[in-house]
Image: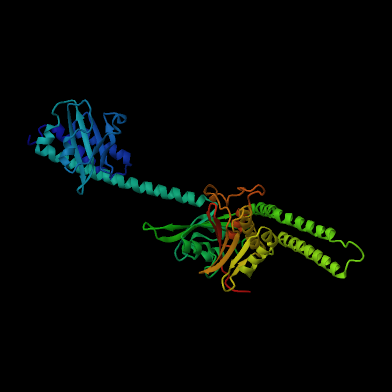
Amino acid sequence: MAYISDEKKLYQRTKALSDTFALSSKTLDYKSTLRMVAKQFKVFTEADASVLMLNDGKGNLNTAYSIGIPISEIKDATLPLSKRLKDIIARPVIDARYTSFLNTPLIRNRKLIGLSAVFSTVPEIFHPFEHGKYESLFLTMLAGYAAINIENASLDEAVRSMEYSQANWKNIFNSIDDLISVHDRDYNIILANKSVAREFNKNEKEIIGKKCYEIYYGSDECSAICPCRRVSETKTKCAANITYPKKQGVFNITTFPFFDETGNCIGTIRVTKNVSEFKGLQNQTVLTEKVSSLGAVIGWILHEYDNSCTAIHGNKPAGANESVKRYRSVLNGILKKSGCASGIIKHVVDLMEHEGIAKINIDIHQIIDEAISWFSDRLKVHDIQIDREYHKLPIIICCYKKQMLQVFINLISNALDAMEDQGDNERILSVKTEKYGTLAKIYVKDTGCGIPMENKDKIFEPFFTTKKSGIGLGLPLCQKIVLEHGGTIHVSSQTGKATTMTVELPLAKHKN
């Protein structure tokens, strides 16, 4: 058939073409566009059913819309994309009880957008579109307009979805009470939620583009203990509790690195939470753990007191004729024993006193030596050797001395506990210090029983303990103190052989 003989059909097809073309100038949602395209193909071909299948970009044509056939029956129908387009056109889209079907590809800029499939109970009803010059031309025009409309609707849907997602994400981002900001590698703030602006009484324009240390610390330079700096250097998460200048309260900061698609660290994400309300409870927890950890020391006090009493009663002169030399020996022994007990009591009193309000610059070796002195008698009783491998120069850190002393008392106490039941095995407590860039590194190693693999990830969890006594807050307390000083604490252990605790702390800028 070389021409369209029925004027009514010609009108229907021309109108379908015109309406399909006009869709490009209308604002319709994606589903409405699919419905209109499927309807125009049904009217244009006088079919009983019309189905649209769209390219999913993964090698398949999936059912997207249907008129005349329940979508529930064909929603899972797919066609694999073929290298030969005629193979797609010649293959029925579904196994339906129709005597004839017609598949028309929807192509836009040489890209297969989808496929129109129409069905009829009338035999050979679609032959004119396959053999008639004008019918075939009109159908090709309809398919071209339909492809344009579907592609435009898809793009518009994608844009709307992105805009909605962005708006929704931004609302969620700004609804979070925690202070969240994103920084580039040069510490410039590139994104911040409204909580940051509220906390520092600024608007968004006054924050974006500024250095993070300007906003958070009111400083002109990045501190050595700045969590963003630490994360940029280590490429790992960092957490710490700090106070901000001119801000009341304590803030918990967790900083994360973020990476580009090639795995390069391109900035940091900082999440800040005001934890002032929990500080009182934390301080009580610290005090509780101090009392618990001092239980062993109090036992030594009683032991020394008992030894002193034994020395006094066991060395009383037997008679009036005892020599002056004997008196002197007894008195010296009593003084030595009572002095040892007095020294331990002084340690306890010093540690239980409240911390000063200011940090001090101090040589870490001084703190370690003081911590070791707590256990001088215990080391002798259990024949434990001390191996000090200190850096040749003083390593100055800025810290609350008593808090840092508590850290190393806990670490050394745990090391001694691990070695005391090792039978005839060699017992060595090794302490090594070194400088690593802007950090001080301290290694506390024992030759004890090691930590079982199943417990290794739990040792910093509050209230986890494998000891018969204690409440399991020693290492969590150590971790808390170290993090608050801008440092980190790690463990490495071999079951039955050794355990090494590594503490990293930022070096002080200047000595006292």
Residue 122 at x, y = what percent?
16, 26
* Residue under the image location 61 percent in, 49 percent down: 462
Looking at the rendered structure, the number of numbered marks drawn on it comes to: 0
> Who's the residue at 27% across and 31% down the image?
67
In which quarter of the view is residue 43 placed?
top left
Q: Do we see residue 301 in this rendering?
A: yes
When the figure is inspected, residue 358 is found, relative to residue 67, above or below; the finding is: below
Q: Residue furthest front?
A: 321
**Horizontal arrangement in the rendering, residue 413 relative to residue 180 (left or right):** right
Give the image's coloring scheme: rainbow
User: 309 or 148, which lies in front?
Assistant: 309
In this view, the residue farthest toward the left is: 2
Q: Residue furthest right?
A: 320
Q: Position of residue 464 (x, y in %)?
A: 60, 47
Write down the quadrant of residue 219 in the picture: bottom right
Q: Nearer the viewer, residue 356 or 83?
A: 356
Task: Identify the image quadrant of the N terminus.
Answer: top left
Q: Position of residue 333 (x, y in %)?
A: 80, 65
Q: Is residue 27 above or below residue 41?
A: below
70 displayed left or right of 163: left
From the viewer's perspective, is 305 left or right of 459? right
Q: Quadrant of the C terminus?
A: bottom right
Question: How far across and how far down the image is residue 318, in percent?
Answer: 89, 61
Residue 14 visible to an observer of this rendering: no
